[in-house]
């Protein structure tokens, strides 16, 4: 049974994916691959912006990257690992049939990110069980990877995103309600100029490890699954 998506990147909130793997998604689009973003919530508990504003920003970011986007509308900060949420996520995985699934980090300062990782890993496994009572035809991604948290350590895999760096950062900057330094808005951690510098500096450092200008990192259970390695090889192949 063939996959429908090459790559699905999942975030707990709009902008989570763009912080970490926007370049990977832009590369996938440029290589003719089918890629998408899945947001579990609309980020309605965020200090800045509204759920509607963040939805509009998220759609603009997806347009810039050249991918599709869906939001499951789980309650921000209040979704759990209970079956009601797992089944909804399982049904979405069965609907879009990704070959590779990218998740938030298992260890992160934000509880939603940690919970999203655990919930999605379980959903990805159980979605492949034919006897599990869940809508859709059974489907299990061939590989699961995750993006970095606060202090993720040495990456397992690095992807050269130099060719799409400007577009990747344009998608990041599309979330003006979250990242703009607007003096009329509360100064949050991610709205501070140091946060953006951290995103740029991290990619520059990882690029130095790959001997390229900019890179993004992934982690996975080792040895790296064949499907993940094949996808990454396609990402870095000539356009």
Image (spheres, rainbow, N blue to C red):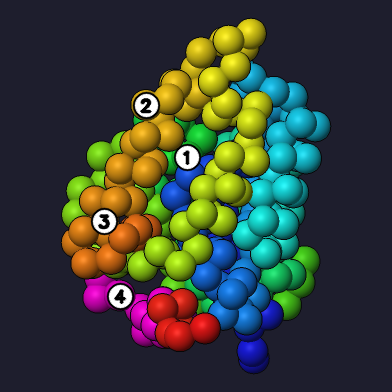
Tell which tag, 1 or 3, sits nearer the viewer.
3
Q: Can the viewer see residue 218?
A: no
- The label shown at residue 206 is 3
Mark 1–mark 3 Cα distance, whole angstroms, equals 22 Å
> Do the numbered discs 4 and 1 sit on residues whose CB atoms are within 8 Å?
no
Tell which tag, 3 or 4, sits nearer the viewer.
3
> At 36% across and 67% down in the image, what residue appears?
159
Percent position of residue 24, x then y? 48, 64
> Do the numbered discs 3 and 4 sit on residues whose CB atoms are within 8 Å?
no
Residue farthest to the bottom? 1
The image shows residue 111, relative to residue 23, as above or below, that is above
Percent position of residue 7, x then y? 56, 71
Mark 4–mark 1 Cα distance, whole angstroms, equals 22 Å
> At 47% across and 40% down in the image, what residue appears?
113
Highlighted range, magenta? 219-233
Mark 3–mark 4 Cα distance, whole angstroms, equals 18 Å
> At 69% across and 44% down in the image, what residue appears?
58
| Mark 4 closeness class: few <14, some 14–19, many ≥20 residues within 10 Å | some
| Mark 3 closeness class: few <14, some 14–19, many ≥20 residues within 10 Å | many
- Residue on which the image places disc 1: 113
Q: Can the viewer see residue 188?
A: yes
Mark 1–mark 2 Cα distance, whole angstroms, equals 21 Å
| Mark 1 closeness class: few <14, some 14–19, many ≥20 residues within 10 Å | many
Mark 4–mark 2 Cα distance, whole angstroms, equals 33 Å
- Residue on which the image places disc 2: 194
- The label shown at residue 224 is 4
- 220 is within the stretch colored magenta: yes
- 231 is within the stretch colored magenta: yes
Q: Quadrant of residue 62?
A: bottom right
């Amino acid at each position: 049974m063939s996959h429908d998506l090459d790559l699905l990147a999942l975030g707990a909130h709009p902008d989570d994916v763009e912080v970490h793997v926007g370049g990977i998604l832009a590369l996938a689009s440029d290589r003719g691959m089918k890629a998408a973003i899945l947001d579990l919530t609309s980020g309605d508990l965020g200090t800045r912006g509204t759920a509607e504003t963040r939805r509009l920003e998220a759609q603009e970011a997806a347009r810039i990257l050249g991918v599709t986007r869906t939001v499951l509308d789980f309650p921000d900060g209040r979704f759990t690992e209970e079956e009601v949420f797992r089944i909804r996520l399982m049904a979405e995985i069965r609907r879009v049939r990704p070959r590779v699934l990218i998740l938030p980090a298992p260890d992160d300062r934000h509880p939603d990110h940690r919970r999203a990782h655990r919930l999605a890993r379980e959903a990805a496994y159980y979605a492949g069980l034919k006897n599990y009572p869940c809508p859709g035809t059974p489907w299990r991604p061939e590989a699961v990877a995750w993006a970095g948290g606060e202090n993720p350590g040495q990456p397992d895999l690095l992807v050269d995103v130099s060719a799409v760096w400007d577009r990747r950062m344009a998608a990041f900057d599309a979330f003006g309600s979250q990242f703009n330094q607007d003096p009329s808005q509360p100064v949050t951690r991610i709205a501070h100029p140091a946060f953006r510098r951290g995103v740029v500096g991290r990619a520059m450092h990882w690029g130095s490890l790959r001997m390229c200008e900019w890179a993004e990192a992934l982690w996975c259970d080792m040895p790296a699954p064949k499907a993940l390695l094949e996808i990454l090889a396609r990402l870095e192949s000539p356009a």
